[in-house]
């Protein structure tokens, strides 16, 4: 496994291995089973697998959040070597954003609601770093988790709009045994908060049950999910949204496919989760 820091070295490595297909897994490090599931899918579908580890400062509005984001590069590299990854890029911030850096990528409408409203500038940072990764690695496929549903849509839109010659592969959310979506931020949860963090998954399952039972008013669902989360004294709701899964616009009546998105801070640690529900499937399950 090659571990490189410089853009020129990454490009040289790619030039030496142009015959095969490359799969790229972008990460911010502190890897968990969710990341490794992306790596394994990339390994199954490509000749070579590359992983980037870069804690991107441009997608953090909160400086304290950036400072406290968990890090363990040695552990990350050991995990990736065990997965037989071919190439890992661990650039310094100055390699990505030199002092005279001026260019950013902005996706317009998809970046406005939900995470875009809660974290201004976040998606500009995401789109910019992902575009740079695509440009440097030139992969045939890139792998992203569905836990970050809005981010996934935004990257798909960027790839379409800017004519990147690659496939964005969406991969299922990986969960802990109790249902909590795996996230690097979970490591920051103290034991009492970790127990209460299950409120997000419970709220999503509550929505699933209510829809299967025939509830179609989005306002009723939002109210019920909010009430459930608020029963946990360490939880603070950022948003509970029921949206169109293609546009992330809020909807008022449940029909077809819907995306339920949650952002909740549990003892100060901000967590997100989501669930896509197909009404026809939900009805069939209820028969």
Image (cartoon, helix red, strand yellow):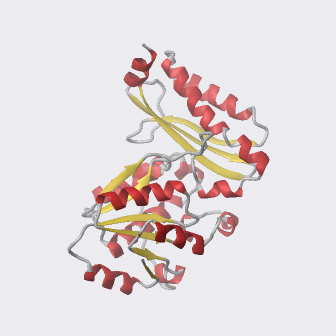
Residue 154, given in percent of the width and then of the height, sits at: 40, 53
Q: Is residue 158 left or right of residue 189?
A: left
Q: Is residue 237 left or right of residue 14?
A: right
Q: Is residue 108 left or right of residue 33?
A: left
Residue 89, given in percent of the width and then of the height, sits at: 45, 76
Furthest residue toward left = 19
Nearer to us in this view, 219 or 90: 90
Residue 204, given in percent of the width and then of the height, sits at: 57, 33
Residue 280, given in percent of the width and then of the height, sits at: 37, 22
Instruction: Please identify the quarter of the rendering in which residue 87 is found.
Output: bottom left
Which residue shows up at 54% across the image and 22% down it? 209
**Quarter the C terminus occupies:** top left
**Is residue 255 placed above or below 182 in the rendered structure?**
above
Which residue shows up at 63% across the image and 30% down it? 225
**Quarter the N terminus occupies:** bottom left
Which residue shows up at 37% across the image and 26% down it? 256
Q: How many marks?
A: 0
């Amino acid at each position: 496994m090659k571990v490189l820091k410089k853009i020129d070295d990454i490009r040289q490595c790619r030039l030496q291995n142009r015959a095969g297909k490359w799969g790229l897994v972008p990460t911010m490090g502190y890897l968990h089973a969710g990341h490794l599931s992306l790596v394994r899918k990339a390994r199954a579908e490509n000749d070579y697998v590359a992983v980037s580890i870069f804690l991107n400062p441009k997608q953090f509005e909160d400086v304290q959040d950036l400072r406290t984001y968990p890090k363990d590069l040695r552990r990350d590299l050991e995990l990736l070597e065990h997965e037989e990854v071919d190439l890992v890029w661990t650039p310094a911030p100055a390699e990505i954003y030199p002092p005279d850096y001026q260019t950013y990528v902005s996706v317009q409408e998809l970046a406005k609601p939900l995470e875009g409203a809660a974290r201004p500038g976040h998606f500009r940072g995401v789109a910019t770093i992902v575009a740079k990764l695509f440009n440097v690695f030139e992969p045939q496929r890139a792998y992203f988790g569905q836990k970050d549903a809005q981010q996934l849509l935004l990257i798909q839109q960027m790839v379409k709009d800017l004519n990147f010659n690659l496939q964005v592969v969406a991969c299922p959310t990986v969960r802990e045994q109790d249902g909590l979506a795996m996230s690097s931020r979970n490591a920051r949860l103290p034991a009492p908060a970790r127990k209460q963090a299950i409120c997000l998954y419970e709220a999503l399952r509550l929505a699933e049950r209510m829809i299967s039972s025939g509830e179609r008013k989005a306002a009723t669902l939002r109210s019920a999910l909010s009430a459930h989360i608020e029963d946990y004294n360490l939880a603070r709701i950022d948003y509970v949204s029921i949206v169109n899964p293609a546009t992330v616009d809020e909807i008022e009546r449940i029909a077809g496919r819907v995306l339920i998105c949650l952002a909740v801070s549990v003892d100060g640690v901000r967590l997100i989760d989501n669930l896509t529900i197909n009404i026809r499937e939900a009805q069939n399950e209820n028969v």
